[in-house]
Image (cartoon, rainbow, N blue to C red):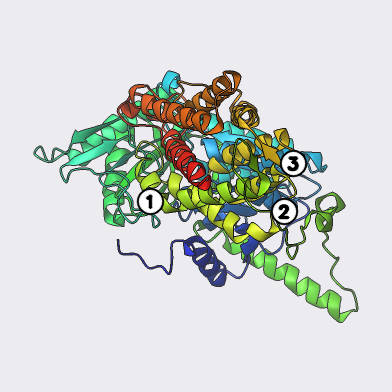
Amino acid sequence: MKKIMNTPESFVYDMCHGLAAAHPELEFVEKFKIVKKVDINEDKVSLISGGGSGHEPAHAGFVGKGMLDAAVCGDVFASPSQVQVYNAIKKCATDKGVLLIIKNYSGDCMNFNNAMSDAQEDGIKVDAVYVNDDIAVKDSLYTVGRRGVAGTVLVHKCAGAAAEQGKELEEVKRVANKVIDNVRSFGFAFTSCTVPAAGHPTFEIGDDEMEFGVGIHGEPGRFREKIDYSKGTFSDDLSRRIVTDLEEDLGLKKGEEVVLLINGFGGTPLQELYILNNSVTKALGSDEIKIHRTIVGNFMTSIDMAGASITVLRVDEELKSLIDYPVSTPALTWGAAMDSQAEAAVEAMNAIRKALGYAPAPQEAPKKAKKAAKAEEEDANAVYEVEGKPEVGEKINTAAFVQIVEKMADVIIENEVPFCEADQMGDGDFGMSIAKGFRQLKADWATRKKGDIGEFLVSCSEIIKEYCGGASGPIWGSAFKYAGKAMLGKKEVDLKDIAFLFTEANRGVYETGKKSFGKGAEIGDKTLVDALKPCALALTKAAEEGKKLQEGLDLGAKAAHEGAEATKTVVATLGRAGTVGERSIGFPDAGAHGLDVIFNELAKYINGMRK
C-alpha cells in the first residue's frame, strides 16, 4: 500500500483539516468530525449529509453556498456515530429547521435516525430523506434495500437550491424526494479499493475482469465478467447495457429530458470518464432522450477504485431550474459570479453601516439548539476506581468483570485486520469500525463508572456508541446498554445473570434494527445475531439445567461458533452482506464471526482467571 498519509487513525482528521485550510469559508469541528460553513444562515433550512469517508469529494466537498451546510464525516467507509450527527444538527439548527439527506446504508440510517430522534426530543425541527438510487441492487428479497450512491449529489444540489431560495422545510423535503424518485445510478469497477487500515485491496479481481454493479464501498456487484476489447466497441457496448437498465428502471420515454452524471470512483483517469460520457451520450441520443446538463468527474468515489458510475435524473422545469441555480462549493461551482457580487455588495453595505455607527445585526442560533449544551458535557477529569480484587468462582465480581471487558477490547484490537478481511461481502471495514471504538474505550478506561456491573456496561456503551464506526456503533452500543440496564445494582453475577445479560444484549440489537428498518435481525438473517442469540440460548439452557459457570460459558461459546459457521450457508437478508444476496453464500457473516472469536477467547480467559 502506498498512500500520502501519517497514520490510518489520523487519516480522516488530517484530510478534513486540509480541506478547511484550503477553504476558509468552511470550518472543521474536530471533536465531532463535522465540516460545516463558518456562518450558518439563520433564514434558511440547513442541509446536513455525511457518511463514511473515502468517497471524496462527497460529502464535505459539497458544503457551501447552494448545497450543504454541514457534512458529518465517519471513518473510511463507516457511518458517523449518532453523537456526531446529533451535534451537527445542534450546530446547524435554525428556526426554519434541518433536513438530513441520508444514503440508504444500514449504518447511516441507524445513526442519522437515532440522532434525529434525539434532536426532536430537544425541540429542534428536523426531518430526513433517504437516497436509494443504485439499481444494481435488484432483488429486494435478498437485500436491505437499494443503496444511495452518486445520485445523492444531485439530491444535495436541488434541495440545496430550494433551501437557498428560502423555501420551508416541508417544501425542501418535497424537492429532495422528487429528485430521489427520479434518479437512478449504476456502477462498475475494474479494481478493488484499498482501505488505509486494511492495507490491501478489499477483494481480488483478475486483470481481464470487471465487477458489474459494484457499490461505493468496494462491495461486490451483481456479477463478475470478462472484459472483451476484441470488437473495438467495449465502452459503447458497456454504456448501452447500463443505459438500457437505467431507462427501464426509471421508465424513461422518448422526448424526456435528463441530467447526466458520469462519476469516477477515484482511480479512473478523467480522459476515460470523457470516453464513457461520449458513449453514454450516444446511447441516450439513439433513444431520443434529451440531456439538459452533463456533469463529468469524481463526485462520489471509492478511495482509489478504478471504475465509474452512470447516473440519470429525469427533470422537468422545476428540477432544471434547481439544477442550474448558482452553487459554490469546493467540489461543485457554477453560476457563482453573481453570487459573489451579491456577497461583496452585502459586505460593502455593512462597511457603510459600520461607518455610520450601526453594527450588523447579530446572528444567534435558536435557543432550543443551545439549551442544556453545558449540562451535556461530562466531567472528563473524573476518575473511577473499581472496588476490590477480581474474583471468579461460580460468580464473577465487578472487578473481574471489568477485567474481562478489557480483555474483550484487547481481542477486538488484536483482530482488527482479520475482522476486516472477514468482511469480504460487506464494506471491508468491520474490524476497523469496532476496533476504533474499543481502542477509545481503553483510552477512556479511567472515566468509565465502575460502581457495579450494570453501571459499568452502560458507561462503556456511551463510548462504543460514539466511536465504533458505521452500524457497529448503534448495534454494539445498544447491546452493551441493554445488558447494562439488566445488571444495574449487581456487584457480582452468576451463570443465570450472564444468560440474562446476553439475552438483553440480543434484545438491544433487535430493537435497534427494528427502530431503524422496521425489522430486527433474527437467526438466519446472516448478522451477528446468528452468533449472539444461540450463545444467549445456550447460556440460558445451561443455567436452567444447573450447570457450573465455566461449563455454561463453554457451551455458549460453542453455540456462538456453530451459529457463525452456519452463516456460510445462507443468503444474507440483513446486515453487512445484505446488498449482495446469493453471492454471500460461502462466506460467514463478519459480525457473527467476530463474536465467535471474541466469545471463545473470553471463555478461555475466564477459565484461566480461576487459576
Left or right, 595 with respect to 94, comes to left
Mark 1 residue type:
Val
Q: Is mark 2 on a helix, strand or loop?
A: loop
Please say if 490 is above or below 22: above
Characterize the local packing of mark 1: few (<14), some (14-19) or many (20 or more) Cα atoms within 10 angstroms.
many
Characterize the local packing of mark 3: few (<14), some (14-19) or many (20 or more) Cα atoms within 10 angstroms.
some
Q: Nearer the viewer, residue 470 or 552?
A: 552
Q: Is mark 1 on a helix, strand or loop?
A: helix
Number of the front mark, 1 or 2: 2
Task: Tell me the quadrant of the picture where the N terminus can be found.
Answer: bottom left
- Residue at image mark 2: 387
Please say if 497 is above or below 51: above
Count of numbered circles in the view:
3
Mark 3 residue type:
Asp
Q: Can residue 126 be seen in this view?
A: no
- Residue at image mark 3: 118
Q: Where is residue 610 in the image (x, y as percent from the top left)?
A: 53, 44
Q: Is mark 3 on a helix, strand or loop?
A: helix
Q: Nearer the viewer, residue 495 or 522?
A: 495
Q: Indicate which disc residue 417 carries.
A: 1
Q: Where is residue 230 in the image (x, y as percent from the top left)?
A: 8, 39
Q: Residue at x 63, y 40 (%)?
A: 480
Q: Where is residue 501 in the image (x, y as percent from the top left)?
A: 63, 32
Residues tagged 2 and 3 counted as in contact (Cβ below 8 A): no
Left or right, 358 with respect to 240, comes to right
Mark 2 residue type:
Glu
Characterize the local packing of mark 2: few (<14), some (14-19) or many (20 or more) Cα atoms within 10 angstroms.
few
Real-space Cα distance between discs 2 and 3? 34 Å
Q: Which residue is drawn at 60% across and 19% down?
A: 544
Q: Which of marks 1 and 2 is nearer the N terminus?
A: 2
